[in-house]
Image (cartoon, rainbow, N blue to C red):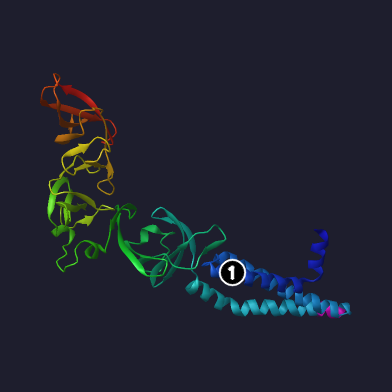
Amino acid sequence: MKKRLSQIKENILVYDFIFIGVNLILNFILYLMNIRFRSWMIIAIIFISAVGFVTGILQQIYKATKSKKTMIMISILSFIFMATLIFVSFPFIRIGLAFGHQPEHVVVLDGKKYVAVVKSFLHVDVDYYDYYGPLLMGTKVKVHGDFGEGGFDPFTYPSSADQVEYTYYDKNGKIKAKRMEIFIKDKDGKIVDRIKQDINRKDRFNENENYLLPEEAEVLYEKKFDETILRFSKIDSVSGQNMLVHVIKSNDGGENFYVVSEDTLQVSNEAEFVFLNEMLGFAASTGKITLNDDKGLLVTNDGGKTFTSANLEYENSNVDDITIEKMPYYEKDVLKMKCSIYQLNSSRDGYEEKEITFISNDNGLHWQLENENQ
């Protein structure tokens, strides 16, 4: 190891050329795989190469010069030349950094890690590339974020933007989706919520020119909490007597509505809905809950952004499904749901309908039997 270091020290210029050559080949190989070095790594490689080149040239001059006085003179002149070059070029470097600097951030978008490159001269644009660790990143833009006019870094100053439009690209660079995020801020300008809206919904669910704004869509259910209004609204009809619905929200008493749901829900045309507060809501697709897979009752605990299937802890070999008689409700601060089943009677010579009540202690995610009326 010491011998190798000694060889490098004695032949800096040669090894500098080897270093440059290896990096050029490595960059070419990475480019073929749509990968490249991160910007800081490229700057480090260029800096090491430049320092090695200048040092190597000076070393060769020193080796060819036998006079100590001449060596000192060359060193002084080299120092003066480098200092003058830096002094003269510094204003241009500063201008270039001010207008051409594109900061990079490692961020998570939609659950995936990206390298976000910010371009913020007059208009703030962010390109998201695949993340391959601290040294490498992808070469193709996977997502583009349009943060609007300005000259700020949305990751350093996140409250500067009012909204962002994301454009998603496939592996061939073609647009595959777009969505908008509107930032809800408090009185101090701090972002407290985000309204996500698929701006391609017109193309996906209704291909005619009669697409309605959220506030104009058919209202299936509405609940008001002070100035906040939550609605289940219909997007479109689909086959099998079903429809696509989502949740929209107004924070100003109904003057403006925004789409809240991240994904649409497919339910039957007879579906029932309820919101018990601004966060807790339910959607019952057919009014029945199938026991073997718990389908039928969907619950949201984030104001309609996401929905999950509620789980009923009930076993009865004579019953395949449960009918919801009354959507979830509060009774003395206890979350309940009134249901019924249709099964063989105790004498097994006929059928009877039984009323059962479920309670939930985790905001509707799991339900346990409270009682069974004989």
> Measured from the top left, where is residue 366 in percent x and y?
28, 33
Q: Nearer the viewer, residue 248 or 174?
A: 174
Up-down relation of residue 319 to residue 252 (above or below): above
Dividing the picture into quadrants, the one containing residue 13 is: bottom right
> Measured from the top left, where is residue 250 in percent x and y?
19, 53
Q: Nearer the viewer, residue 48 or 68?
A: 48
Magenta stretch contains residue 296: no
> Measured from the top left, where is residue 301 in percent x and y?
28, 42
Q: Is residue 183 left or right of residue 222?
A: right
Write the residue at 13% across / 52% down.
219
Work out which quarter of the rendered image holds the C terminus and state it.
Answer: top left
Please give the residue where the numbered disc 1 appears in the rendered image. 29
Write the residue at 50% across / 70% down.
101
Write the residue at 54% across / 70% down.
32
Magenta segment range? Answer: 69-73
> Measured from the top left, where is residue 14 in percent x and y?
76, 73
